[in-house]
Amino acid sequence: MRRTTIHAVLPFWFCLCGFVLPAMAWEREALPAFHERRARLVRETGGDGIIIMFGYGDAEVASSVTMFRQNETFYYLTGWNEPRAMMMLVPRSPKAGRQGPEIEKEILFIPPHDTRPSSYHGELWEGPKLGPEDADAPARTGFPIVKSTTLFQAELQEALKSFSKVYAEMTPQPESGEECFIQDMQARLKKAAPLVTFVDFRENILRQRMVKSPGEIALIRKAADASVEAHLAAMKTVRPGVWEYEVAARMQYEFQRRGCEWPAYPPIVGSGFFSTVLHYDTNSRQMQDGDVVVMDVAGSYGGYTSDITRTLPVNGKFTSRQKEIYEIVLAAADAAIAAAKPGMYLGRRGKKGLHEIAYDYVNSHGKDMHGKRLGQYFIHGLSHSVGLNVHDPFDFEQPLEPGMIVTIEPGIYIREEKLGVRIEDDILITETGCEVLTRRLPRSVEAIERAMAER
Ligand SMILES: [Mn+2]
């Protein structure tokens, strides 16, 4: 569904269903895709325990300073993008005589309708919401049972008559900042069910999230396409005298007007010396003639990220030294892309490791000002997975499989020369190799100089 369509039919939905979308339009996969993930989680945990997950609420997302962003695992399993929700999956009871990992109950708990005038999170302040009382709640959520969050305790006690094990997220997702959320969820669950055994299901979710569904791939394509347009616009914006934040602003405008809800990560537009600073995000310098500028900028669409970097000569023409370094990075990226296929590894694995392939190229071509090899200037990893997170959960010990989407992003950063170059594309692993999702965006020196000359 396109956003324009959503807006066009919104008044119609208001009247017909009394149901309303979240304030922000948001494309999501078809509801059966989320059910499939829940069913797989029950299957893979063996059906011997209740599966519980909480969504984010007011403690995790400060709504006065930011838009609501759902917990990734919760969104992955439910597709539900509203605060203060909970999920419970109850497998078929062993007592029922039919062993097996089928789901007996799939329950989504959401807050009841709240129309009190002074309620900060009520519907007078935040707009009409779906309530558990609404007849169409199952159809709208894909959950056969939708209940009020006030009934969670009672439902848990009922399920505990058949099970003594609860699967929940017991460890935070790396880099997520969700440590407090996980601790709080555990404390609440242990208080509610002091006698049960808790088992972490993060490993199961990790394995599922590493390989993208067709619906996820479609959303990442949209994020990548909109972000490619942002980079094309940047190629016509960058020139001496322009400020880095102007480029960042133009890029965000371009991907957001194409439906991205927010940047996939803080935009990095670093020129001159700052081209060598990996996580420079103040974007506060005026670009000078003779600089290169590294633009690591991309949007997120329907919750799914892309991640793209290009390095441009600020005046539209690379110097011979800039061109030399740029082409080493480009060839390293090309070597890794050419080698990317099922069975290869992202990390260091000798001839089977894409990082090794790119690093070896960098380290065997060109020299710094002291005649030293360039490998020492390639200071970060080659690749990571993208998905709901721009650094999506990934097990680097596992080989690549069809359906994985990862970045390829070698870089060389020579501070002494104020010269940083990174080139980053997103690739989809296929049966026989890979598809570069960002291939429309100029990469070669000639193509970039041509695109910049067209402004
Ligand atoms: Mn990246």
Image (cartoon, grey):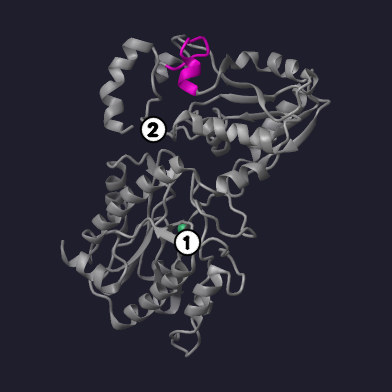
Q: Is residue 410 visible?
A: no
The reply to whether the C-beta atoms of the residues labelled 2 and 1 are less than 8 Å apart is no
Q: Tell me if 397 is positioned left or right of 32 in this view.
A: right
Q: Which residue is mark 2?
A: 26
Q: Is ligand 1 less than 8 Å from the beta carbon at label 2?
A: no
Q: Is residue 259 visible?
A: yes
- Give the total of numbered labels: 2
Residue 432, disc: 1
SS type, badge 2 = loop
Q: Main secondary structure of the magenta part?
A: loop
Q: What crowding class fits label 1: few (fewer than 14 Cα within 10 Å), some (14-19), or many (20 or more)?
A: few
Task: Please state which amino acid type lies under the numbered disc 2.
Answer: Trp
134 part of magenta stretch: yes
**Where does residue 434 sit, x and y in percent of width and height?**
44, 60
The residue range painted magenta reads 129-141
**Where does residue 325 sit, x and y in percent of width and height?**
38, 78
Q: Earlier in the sequence, mark 2 or mark 1?
A: 2
Q: Is ligand 1 less than 8 Å from the beta carbon at label 1?
A: no
**Where does residue 28 sit, x and y in percent of width and height?**
42, 34
Q: What crowding class fits label 2: few (fewer than 14 Cα within 10 Å), some (14-19), or many (20 or more)?
A: some
Residue in view at x 33 percent, y 16 percent? 13
Task: Please state which amino acid type lies under the numbered disc 1.
Answer: Thr
